[in-house]
Every structure is written in structure tokens, then in C-alpha cells.
Amino acid sequence: MEKNALRQCRWHGYATIAGLEQAAAHEILRQAQEAVHHRGVFRLVLAGGVTPRGIYGLLRQAQADWGAWHIYFGDERCLPSEHPERNSRMAAETWLNHVAIPRHQIHVIPAERGAEPAAAAYAQTLSAVGEFDLVLLGLGDDGHTAGLFPDHTWGEKSGAPVAMAVHNAPKPPPDRVSLSAARLSASRAVIFLVSGEAKRQAVADWRSGRRIPASVITPVAGVDIFLGSALLS
Ligand code: 6PG
């Protein structure tokens, strides 16, 4: 991984998960306030998985100019829209159903249609959207992020498709839709949310400069990784 990309990883360690969640929620709200003040809108991409749940729960309690928020998803599992394992359902139940973000400003990936049609539909949705303001991402035990898995294509080159159909994903379900690394990198800010001993090797690989899916998310301003401080030792 070239030097400057390594340099642009800012690691923020927290002794407790509660501390990580509070810091992340605070930073999301701070960036939202700044975006709305300067541009009248806040375009946020949500991470799936389990780690963001506590942060979304804190956002549920927050005061914000929700009418200016537009919500997107970094990836979605090809399951029925109300399936308990859907990333969109987790975000809705923990947060989005409880705040006044206009429903038409919550842009769910229609992954229930199948990977290819959903990727095409979401690329159409994003064709009218420029740079995101903030992208939230998780980190898998194998270094994956969003639906970008080792031994799969990551779409990191400019000109890569905006949204990609994913098959044979090692983390079930096998069929997903993921924004490409290039599209996830087209953001003013990117925050990774990482906790749990299972992520130790992926963090060590990343910090040693090994090329993993997370490491090819390279926004101009670099990335911030909010993680359990135990993973830094
Ligand atoms: C998903 C996510 C995936 C997730 C990581 C970390 O659909 O599962 O998009 O990329 O962020 O696997 O998941 P945890 O936060 O549950 O460890």
C-alpha cells in the first residue's frame, strides 16, 4: 500500500465500546451539523453488521436537523426487505424509524430484487448524488468491508461500477449488493467502526500495510478508524 494512503489512516482507540460508540455518534452529529450549515444537506452512508447498532441507538436519542439528512447504505444482503438480517431493517429498528428523516430520503438498496437488478437500480439512484459527506464502514475478521471480500473484485479503480452484485460472499448470505471501493471513497469523510477481538488480525494486517479490502477505501481526506484500543497493542 503506497505510503501516503497508509499515512492517511487515523487510528482512534477507545478503552470501552461505550466510549467508542459515544465518540462515533458525536462525530457523526458534528459532521452533519457542519454539512447542513455549509451545504444544506447531509449525505450519510450506513454500515451494516452488528457493530453500528449501539451508535444508531445513540443517534435515535439525538437532536438533529433530520429533515436535511439523506441516508444511503454501503451494502445490503439479498434477502426479503423485512428479513431480520437485512442491514436496512437493523438501521430502521434501532434508529431510522424513530427520527424525522423524511422516508423518501432513506435510500434503501432493493436487494430483495436480486443482486444484479438491485445493483443497477441503486447505481441509478446514486447517479444524481455527488460526493457523500460521510461513509460509515465496518471491518470483517478477514479484512472485508461493506460487501467487498477477499478474492472478490473490489472496484477500486476510477471508472469502476458504482454498485456491484456480489456472489459467493464468505459471510452469509452469499448474495449481496455492495457499493464499489471507488464509490465508497468518493466521500468527504470515511469512518470505520471496529470492535471485538476477532478483528485483531485484520487490524494488524491493515496497519502493516497489507492490501485488504478496507485498505482500498482511500478518500482524499483519508480515513478515521474508531476501534477498541486493545486492538492497537
Ligand atoms: C454486513 C456488513 C459487513 C460488516 C462487517 C463487520 O452486511 O455484514 O456490511 O461489511 O460491516 O462484516 O460486521 P460486524 O460489525 O457485525 O462485526
Image: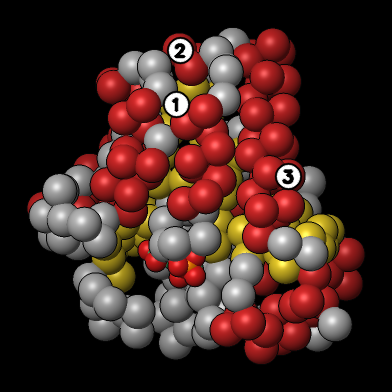
Q: Circle 1 is placed at which residue position?
A: 70
Q: Amino acid at mark 3?
A: Ala
Q: Nearer the viewer, mark 2 or mark 1?
A: 2
Element type at marker 2?
A: helix
Q: Is mark 3 within 8 Å of ligand 1?
A: no
Mark 2 and mark 3 lie on one chain; the one further toward the N terminus is: 3
Q: Are marks 3 and 1 in contact (CB under 8 Å)?
A: no
Residue 152 versus residue 230: which sits nearer the camera?
230
C-alpha separation, residue under disc 2 versus residue under disc 3:
23 Å
- Name the residue tied to disc 3: 23
Judged left or right of residue 128, residue 88 is left
Q: In front of the other: label 2 or label 3? A: 3
Determine the CA span between mark 3 and mark 1.
21 Å
**Circle 1 crowding by C-alpha within 10 Å: few under 14, some 14–19, many from 20:** many
Residue in front for this viewpoint, 29 or 164: 29
Q: Secondary structure at mark 1?
A: strand
Q: Residue at x 85, y 82 (%)?
A: 233
Residues at discs 2 and 3 in contact (Cβ within 8 Å): no
At 52% from the left and 60% from the top, the residue drawn is 51
Q: Nearer the viewer, mark 3 or mark 1?
A: 3
In terms of sequence position, does the residue under pointer 3 or pointer 1 come before the other? 3
Colour scheme of this structure image? secondary structure
Q: What type is the residue that disc 1 sits on?
A: His
- Dot 2: within a 10 Å radius of its alpha carbon, few (fewer than 14), some, or many (20 or more) residues? some
Taking the spot 37% from the left edge, 32% from the top edge, the residue there is 96
Residue toward you, 43 or 123:
43
